Amino acid sequence: MRARPKNVLLLIFVVVALPVFWMSFVIKPDATNEVLVEHRLAEMRERLEFAQNLNKIREHDLKVLQSQFKFMVNSQANLDNHSRASSNESILREMQQALQNYSRQTDHQRIYIPSIFSYLPHLLGNDGSVQPAFKISQNRIGVTMVYGVPTVKRARESYLIRTLEHLVNGLDEQEKEDSLIVIFVGEPFDLEYVKEVGKEIEARLPESVKNGLIEVIAPPASFYPDLNQLQLTLGDPPERVKWRTKQNLDFAFLMLYAKNRGLYYTQLEDDVIAKPGYMATMKNFAINQKNNNWIVLEFSQLGFIGKMFKSQDLPLFAEFFVMFHNDKPVDWLLDNLLTVKYCSPEKSPAHCRKVVAEVRRRYKPSLFQHVGIHSSLKGKTQKLKDKDFAKQDASLIRSHKNPPAELRTSLTVYQKYMLEKAYMGETIFWGLTPEADDTVEFHMKPPVFIQSFLFRSGNREHPGDKFFNTTVEILPASHINDNGAIIENQPGSKMYPEGDKGFLIVGQFNKDGLAQGQIKPEVGEIAVIRLHSQTKGGNWVILSEIMLQTPKR
């Protein structure tokens, strides 16, 4: 039964007008309520625009299907009885030939609008070229935030798992249900590696993959042109032109894949760390903009890290990156697009910067920090750091008065987070992923009695950066002769399990990243206390608290 117009109007009035009347006149005005309503309306406005954009896409798809259906009907009507009885494959061949004939007959009458095929003509006639060649997905849609994380095989250390753990740990349970993290494995010519990455992510973050928070995709090799036949531009060597051209196409593919999955899209990299609570900050920053004419919100000042877009704008950026994929790096193309779109050649550069700043808005302090050292471009070292990254919270550090010691470690130290400063309680110690037999050593100067110890790893901002499978070991002064050589089987050796090189094992880190305990006085003065990694670690490591307590005099 069809609804009457009057009934429809009455229904709209009941659904829309009455709640507004109730909120305006029945509920008492309250400043807090007004702010909440404004935020909700802003979010609903964003979602409405997103839905309208989806409708336009569906309308276009419907027109294409309608056109194809007409051709199918016409082709079927023109077939003779013998053809009607032929197989589906034969019918499809007939239809394809009919379409080609139609195309040849009417080419001179048509005006063709440029599309992605104009810049990547090799994609024509190959639908598989614009579909992922590999995919792990629960097909989650309708979220507020989609995070795109492109990754490639690196010659040295991979930072991907650590980045994903930071992103997941920085979300609360509600945010995990309202987010989607898409990992784009940009190795189309090495599907075995792609599968390995997928298996590792499933093994290390099984719950996030199972519930749909994390997806893994890889593009087909046929999506890319011949990367060995590119025009050399900007005076760059062939290897760099190939690297940045492929990156442009990687980003375009990822954006087009993600465009209908959520309200906003944020581009990240596979070697970043995130400030806890980053999603709430980003969402509030977007909703609280005075107007909605922004096109990019930035949450990091580096490259393409932390760049947030409205999903409805992604086709614009993807098309621009494809159009100039051979010409410039992707972060330069972003700058160029904004200049072309918003700047007048008749105005000054200062005016251009001003108008671009109105649509490209920056949040400070930065929510994402680049931590990778080795670039995805072979042989390139990347030491860029975001100086605006959120300053460390003093409450994350616990200081103690420790005895004098010479400090040594085989771990690679990250930035300024030195072991010496951590020992003095000035900052944390932060080291790259431990290998088996890596150590952090405290050489007592002079040897002292140590009554108890406490080592706390990880902190609230980086809860996953903990020591695991790591023992606490001591070297009694009595185990060293006057020449510094180790003396085996000394008194006190049987009090604790023996390690190597005369060390005794007095404790180990638990699942919470904490190691603490008492040391028997019979051991005597201690020359060295060390943390000894027994296996290769899965994350970087932080020491946020170091306490070596000596007996009170």
Image (cartoon, rainbow, N blue to C red):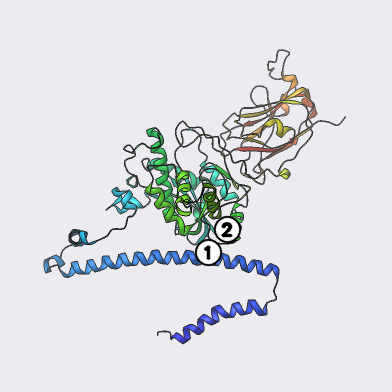
Give residue 342's position: percent from left, percent from top: 48, 54
Give residue 404's position: percent from left, percent from top: 77, 26
Q: Which residue is mark 1?
A: 46
Residue 408, above or below 173: above
Q: Which residue is mark 2?
A: 286
Which mark is first along the chain, 2 or 1?
1
Apparent side of residue 420 relative to residue 374 in the rendered image (left or right): right
Residue furthest to the front in view is: 346
State the residue in front, 248 or 198. 248
State the residue in front, 41 or 210. 41
Q: Quadrant of residue 174?
A: bottom right
Give residue 160's position: percent from left, percent from top: 51, 42
Asked if marks 1 and 2 touch (Cβ < 8 Å), the reply is yes
Q: Quadrant of the N terminus?
A: bottom left
Identify which residue is drawn at 30% across, 50% down. Answer: 123
Apparent side of residue 182 relative to residue 389 in the rendered image (left or right): left
Identify which residue is drawn at 51% across, 32% down. Answer: 381
Q: CA distance from mark 1 to mark 2?
A: 10 Å
Residue 26, above or below 466: below
Under circle 2, the secondary element is helix
Residue 457, above or below 19: above
**Looking at the image, can residue 276 be seen?**
yes
State the residue in front, 376 or 285. 285
Q: Amino acid at mark 2?
A: Ala
Q: Amino acid at mark 1?
A: Glu
Q: Quadrant of residue 485?
A: top right
Under circle 1, the secondary element is helix
**Looking at the image, can residue 136 be seen?**
no
Give residue 360's position: percent from left, percent from top: 54, 52
Q: Quadrant of the C terminus?
A: top right
Identify which residue is drawn at 54% across, 61% down. Answer: 292
Residue furthest to the right in view is: 553
